[in-house]
Image (cartoon, rainbow, N blue to C red):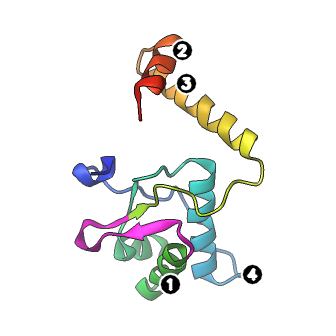
Amino acid sequence: MHRSEAGAHPTTLASVRLTGTRPPYAQVRDRIRSSIERGSLLPGDRLETVRACADRLGLAPNTVARAYRELEDEGWIVGRGRAGTFVADRLPVRPAAPDEALARAAATYIKRAEQLGFDRAAAARALRRSR
């Protein structure tokens, strides 16, 4: 079970500022993809429903559904029926700058551990014990 399946609220995109230059579905798709690449959306995070996203953005549900469908076809997200739509466990492509992406991920992890009251040594031990 993924952490977001246990009853947690789905992840909502902070915002998508729609412009007239590109189709809305492409803007939604690209915003979700970049959020996954940056680590704002993590593996196993549940996305909000198509309807909720469409209502929040003032779009037709089919527009958001198309964005989700393309992301699923590309391997960025996975649909699990009535359980919802989740960020895939693995990125479909390796980041252009993998060392920088790993450094950002590590910095985010350390920052979160410190927020929880742990020092870097405890965070490193936890990391070694995981998978």
- Split into 4 quadrants, where in the image is the C terminus? top left
The residue identified by callout 1 is 66
**In contact (CB < 8 Å): disc 4 and disc 3:** no
In this picture, residue 36 sits left or right of residue 85: right
The residue identified by callout 4 is 21
The first of marks 4 and 3 along the sequence is: 4
**In contact (CB < 8 Å): disc 3 and disc 2:** yes
Within the image, what quadrant is residue 22 found in?
bottom right
Amino acid carrying mark 3 in the image: Ile
The residue identified by callout 2 is 120
The first of marks 1 and 3 along the sequence is: 1
Q: CA distance from mark 3 to mark 2?
A: 7 Å
Within the image, what quadrant is residue 20 found in?
bottom right
The residue that appears at 58% across and 56% down in the rendered structure is 35
The residue that appears at 57% across and 47% down in the rendered structure is 39
For the question of whether residue 114 can be seen, the reply is no
Helix or strand or loop: what does disc 4 sit on?
A: loop
Is 26 within the magenta? no
**In contact (CB < 8 Å): disc 1 and disc 3:** no
Q: CA distance from mark 4 to mark 1?
A: 18 Å
Q: Is residue 67 above or below residue 114?
A: below
Amino acid carrying mark 1 in the image: Arg
